[in-house]
Amino acid sequence: MKLFFPTMFSGSDWLNDVLMEVDTNGMIKSIVSKGKSSDADKIFNGTCLPGLPNLHSHAFQRAMAGLTEIAGSGVANFWTWQKVMYEFLAKLSPDDVEAIASQLYVEMLKGGFTSVAEFHYLHNDKNGGHFENPAEMSDRIFAAANKTGIGLTHLPVLYAHGGFGGLEPHEGQKRFIKTVGQFQLLLETLDDRYGGGSERKIGMALHSLRAVSPDLIKDALALKSEGPIHIHIAEQTREVEQCIEWSGQRPIEWLLGNTDVNERWCLIHATHTTDAETEAVAATRAVAGLCPTTEANLGDGLFPLEKFMNQKGRIGIGSDSNVSVDVAEELRLLEYGQRLNQQRRNIGASVAGTSTGETLFQESLAGGSQALGQSVGFLTPGHRADFIILNNQHPILYGRTGSAIIDSWIFTGGRELISDVFVAGQHLVKNHYHINQESIQSRYHETIKSLTN
């Protein structure tokens, strides 16, 4: 299949009159600049950009977005939000999770995310018991990915404790808990069922230092010698304080001193880091997984972006609690948070004369690809044909060329500029409409109706 685009950003270069050839496995076979539209099987009039890998999602939380914005009598923060989240997930059946994830993944595709790392810790039934099928809930995530066509890196999560020092889990966490033996069975089951596909990858995650003890971390890491490893770390100041009380060290300080953090790792949030920790994380070549809309929604704080990027640190973007599912909004808020904090502009572009939007987009493509462990994020031969098409006829893009296209999309537009989306060469979103949108949306409506009655 050969496709023609008048303009393309490959992830590193701007190209004109591009002929892209995609093989039968959905991989890019060739990219020809100054090509002929007459040689193409299909001609598009918009700007082609790589789809962004979403490195952190909790799919089920999309269904509760907007339901936690009521003030209480005390201070509202992450921990009060967490209580509402526990109450919500207590209602969810496997069918509910599949319906919610399917609707979310349609929205992700339409928002510019063409692959996702699903940080999946909802393992058990409503009573905390184990399903006969050890991968029952994970199977529903794969079913949603298959229905929608989004690329998936599945990250089953080890979650064993209710706090630092191996505290017993409390009632709200009963659906998360697994022993190392149960976690090993889950990993083996998933590898047998889904391992080996180009659009599917299986990694692993440690929920947090609160939820896994040092011994459990060591045991879990021994289970999988390759693939991504993700962990929540230093998201909240209370978490930092509790870690110091437990170990005498800050969370990132403890993690770097007690594990071999390397390119396999993605440190989710890493919001509260010292200068020394920022430099040390950058040196490991691990990815800092930033989730700006969720971090703002929960009042987490701001990651030290400029200091980290000045150290050649690697970043990627996730939608986390999925209060927003829009590439442009995540990148815009990433930059704007830094501007508000430092009272100056264009912080993401550290080199004079470079584009802020393009720099953040390019860095997030590279970091996201690494964090998902997939050959995505760039439109070059050997990478998967995951891309989005911006509508050049939209008024926001009138007269824009090169970097100004990306800057205009991120800082003045959003998901409405994305007309079409491809994953592995499959045309999933056509003129803003997902190919399975009607059936997925209908099922989601019925699910939400049953959950809210």
Image (cartoon, rainbow, N blue to C red):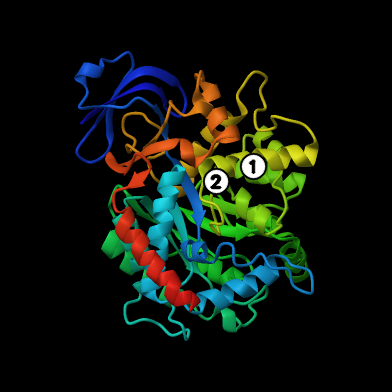
Q: CA distance from mark 1 to mark 2?
A: 9 Å
Residue 255 in the figure: left or right of residue 200: right
Given the image, on which type of amino acid does mark 1 rest? Leu
Residue 221 in the figure: left or right of residue 162: left
Decide: marks 1, 2 in contact (CB < 8 A)? yes
Classify mark 2: helix, strand or loop: strand
Number of residues whose C-alpha sits closer than 10 Å to that of mark 1, classed few (under 14), some (14–19) or many (20 or more): many
Quadrant of image for the N terminus: top left
Image quarter for residue 446? Answer: bottom left
Vertical position of residue 252 compared to residue 245: above or below: above
Given the image, on which type of amino acid does mark 2 rest? Ile
Mark 1 highlights which residue? 334
Residue drawn at (64%, 75%) of the image: 83
Residue 11 rendering spot, x and y as whole percentages: 45, 29
Residue drawn at (70%, 55%) of the image: 253
Residue drawn at (43%, 76%) of the image: 450
Image quarter for residue 237? Answer: bottom right
Mark 2 highlights which residue? 317
Front in this rendered view, residue 170 or 95: 95
Vertical position of residue 352 compared to residue 160: above or below: above
Front in this rendered view, residue 31 or 77: 77
Residue 4 in the figure: left or right of residue 314: left
**Mark 1 or 2, nearer chain start:** 2
Residue 140 rendering spot, x and y as whole percentages: 35, 67
Image quarter for residue 428? Answer: top left
